[in-house]
Each structure stands twice: as structure tokens, then as C-alpha cells.
């Protein structure tokens, strides 16, 4: 996976983090409010939850990247490289269009993970109420599989990353991009969210990622 792909995944996580706040923000808020003590003592819980969540993303990326690498090995090398580049280019274009607000088709991907979440969600109930960072870490690892079209779309993209390590890196970059919106509190979070909601910011970033995707397709064609 190229540096462009990692950078794109980080930007998708950062600008798509507004969507993540809607999905996971309530969970983070509930964890914080349920903890005794001051806001400073709640930071380990917030860090534990987000570390668990991003760890699940990274593990899923490794599995997807390894799976893609295995099946690409069944094809001739040049043909496998072309297939991986085409898949990566298509999903970069789709994700760029989502960020820019031009097409929300990828939100429908959330429905595909509903069956998995029904089996995982009951496990999280056994960890409630959260009392320390260890429980928050475990809960974050479970809730990292929460149905989210944005997460699942980047995960499908990681199939074309070229291997387990590359797939893990792609999902790690995406997870780190989502971190500021979920970790920052108060005025800093509000300013960041107002900035990433600006149409010109989202269209500029989305358009740039679409161009990256088109470049991948040109390479595959060549």
C-alpha cells in the first residue's frame, strides 16, 4: 500500500469522523459520564475505548488484506496487481465521492454487518458498567465491529492493500484519522467538527481522493 493510500485513509477517517461521532460519540459520552471522579480521571477510559476500537480496525484490516493477498496469488502476478489496483481505485473514488457529499451509496454497506453485530453486541453488555480502562479497552474491541458503512468500506478497500501488514496499516491510518473527533472534548472538538463540515473542505478532500483513485485506475490500465 502506497503512502498516498495511507494518507487517503487518514483523511477519510478525519473528515468522516463527523459520522463516527454520530455512531460512537454517544458510547464515549456514556462511558465518561458513568465513571466517578473528574474529567481528568476519565481520560484513561476514553483512551482505552479508542485503543480497543482502533485495534479491532487494525486486526480486521490484517485479515482482509491477508485474504485478498491469498486469492490474488491464484492469478498470474501481473493480472493480480491489476485487479488489486482496480479494486483500490474504485473504492478510493467511492469514498472520495462520499466525503464530498456527491454520492452516499456506501452507507448501505452498514446493512451487511448487521448479522455480525447481533452476535457481538450481547458480549458488550457483560462489561457494563465500565469501571476502569481495562474494561473500556475490551468494550472498544467489541464495539470496533459496530456496523458502520464508512468503516466497512475502508475494510473492503484493505482487501486490495497487497497483504496482511498493508491491510492492517490502511485500517490503522483510518482509525487514527477518526481519533481527534472522538477524543477531543469541548471547544476544540467543536471547532474541528465545524471545520470538517464546511462544504469546500469536504469537496476539496473528496475530490483529491477521487483523483488518487483515478490515478490508481490509470496505473492498472497501463
Image (cartoon, rainbow, N blue to C red):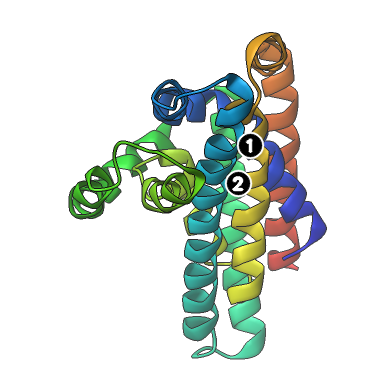
- Locate the C terminus by quadrant: bottom right
Q: Looking at the image, do the residues carrying marks 2 and 1 touch, with CB atoms under 8 Å apart? A: yes
Tell me the element at label 2.
Answer: helix
Percent coordinates x, y for residue 113 in the rendering = 29, 49
Q: Residue at x 51, y 45 (%)?
A: 133
Q: Residue at x 26, y 42 (%)?
A: 111
Q: Nearer the viewer, residue 172 or 41?
A: 41
Q: Residue at x 51, y 65 (%)?
A: 59
Residue pointed to by mark 1: 179
- Locate the N terminus by quadrant: bottom right
Q: Quadrant of residue 201?
A: top right
Tell me the element at label 1.
Answer: helix
Could you tell me how far apart the alpha carbons at marks 2 and 1 are, in whole angstroms?
6 Å
> Is 5 situated left or right of 144 in this image?
right
Counting the numbered discs, the total is 2
Q: Quadrant of residue 81?
A: bottom right
Q: Residue at x 39, y 34 (%)?
A: 107
Q: Is residue 210 visible?
A: no
Q: Residue furthest right?
A: 3
Percent coordinates x, y for residue 56 in the rendering = 48, 57
In this view, 89 is above or below 103:
below
Residue pointed to by mark 2: 175
Q: Nearer the viewer, residue 201 or 191?
A: 191
Percent coordinates x, y for residue 43 in the rendering = 60, 32
Q: Quadrant of residue 26?
A: top left
Amino acid at each position: 500500500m502506497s503512502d498516498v493510500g495511507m494518507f487517503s485513509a487518514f483523511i477519510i477517517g478525519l473528515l468522516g469522523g463527523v459520522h463516527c461521532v454520530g455512531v460512537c460519540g454517544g458510547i464515549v459520552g456514556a462511558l465518561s459520564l458513568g465513571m466517578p471522579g473528574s474529567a481528568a480521571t476519565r481520560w484513561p477510559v476514553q483512551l482505552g475505548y479508542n485503543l480497543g476500537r482502533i485495534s479491532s480496525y487494525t486486526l480486521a484490516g490484517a485479515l482482509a488484506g491477508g485474504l485478498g493477498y491469498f486469492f490474488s496469488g491464484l492469478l498470474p502476478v501481473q493480472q493480480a496487481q491489476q485487479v488489486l489496483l482496480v479494486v483500490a481505485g474504485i473504492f478510493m473514488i467511492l469514498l472520495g465521492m462520499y466525503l464530498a457529499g456527491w454520492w452516499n451509496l456506501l452507507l448501505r454497506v452498514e446493512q451487511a454487518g448487521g448479522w455480525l453485530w447481533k452476535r457481538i453486541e450481547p458480549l458488550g453488555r457483560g462489561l457494563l458498567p465500565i469501571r476502569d480502562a481495562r474494561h473500556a479497552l475490551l468494550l472498544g474491541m467489541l464495539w470496533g465491529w459496530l456496523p458502520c458503512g464508512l468503516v466497512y468500506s475502508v475494510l473492503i478497500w484493505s482487501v486490495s492493500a497487497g497483504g496482511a501488514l498493508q491491510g492492517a496499516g490502511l485500517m490503522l491510518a483510518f482509525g487514527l484519522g477518526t481519533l481527534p473527533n472522538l477524543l477531543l472534548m469541548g471547544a476544540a472538538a467543536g471547532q474541528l467538527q465545524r471545520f470538517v463540515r464546511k462544504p469546500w473542505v469536504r469537496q476539496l478532500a473528496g475530490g483529491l481522493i477521487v483523483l488518487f483513485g483515478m490515478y490508481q485506475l490509470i496505473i492498472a490500465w497501463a
